[in-house]
Image (cartoon, rainbow, N blue to C red):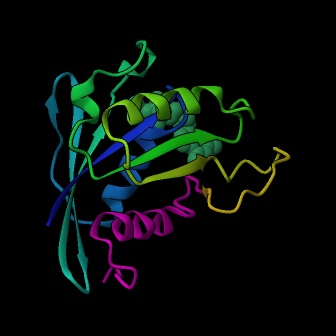
Amino acid sequence: MEYKVILVGDGGVGKDFLVRKMKDINVSSDYITNMGTNVHPLVFDTNYGSVSIKLWDAAGKEKLVGLKEGYHIQSDAGIIMCDFASDPDLISIWNRIKDIRRVCIDLPMLLCRNRSDMKNYTFINFSGVIDISANTGEGVNELIVQLIIRVTKKSDIQIL
Ligand SMILES: Nc1nc2c(ncn2[C@@H]2O[C@H](COP(=O)(O)OP(=O)(O)O)[C@@H](O)[C@H]2O)c(=O)[nH]1
Ligand SMILES: [Mg+2]
């Protein structure tokens, strides 16, 4: 089972740090570049066998007006990332979701909010939003589990 997952979010929200943390958690090799973006192969051992995820990161190109269709096409899930300092209206997030939906109408998406280690923010708890710290690793396991549930559609899948 191999899946394409796109990682989407403004520059500076912590995407590179998240990829690094995900690599700590499981076996993976180096990234390859494709269309000027980074594609990170991640392999997770689960009770349903190994699940391979190719995680696409815009690699600094997120500042361009919308990513090209080829970035989004044929993906199996998306991780939309913001952080606790992001604009609470999440305008940029909605624009990115619009870009995705132009290409993949029904893409399962997870919204994750980074920097939970920075306790000086006053924040609203949103049910369904996965709070993580790509710095300490808090919440990253939960994000991975939710991600592999979405791509495999197996609600009882577990990382071994
Ligand atoms: N406090 C804190 N800082 C973080 C966290 N994740 C990333 N950062 C910082 O945010 C900066 C930008 O992160 P990076 O992963 O390069 O963001 P990207 O542009 O989305 O790839 C880095 O210099 C990190 O030091 C986090 O969970 N907590
Ligand atoms: Mg980056």
Residue 100 against residue 67 in the figure, above or below: below
Q: Residue at x 22, y 45 (%)?
A: 40
Does residue 145 show up magenta in the picture?
A: yes
Q: Position of residue 147 (x, y in %)?
A: 39, 62
The stretch in magenta equals: 131-160
Residue situated in front as seen by the camera: 140 or 151: 151
Q: Residue at x 37, y 42 (%)?
A: 105
Position of the C terminus by quadrant:
bottom left
Q: Position of residue 53 (x, y in %)?
A: 23, 57
Q: Position of residue 111 (x, y in %)?
A: 54, 50
Q: Residue at x 37, y 71 (%)?
A: 149
Position of the N terminus by quadrant:
bottom left
Image quadrant in which you'd find residue 89: top right
Left or right position of 43 against 13: left
Left or right position of 69 against 78: left
Left or right position of 101 against 54: right
Q: Position of residue 132 (x, y in %)?
A: 58, 56
Image quadrant in which you'd find residue 128: bottom right
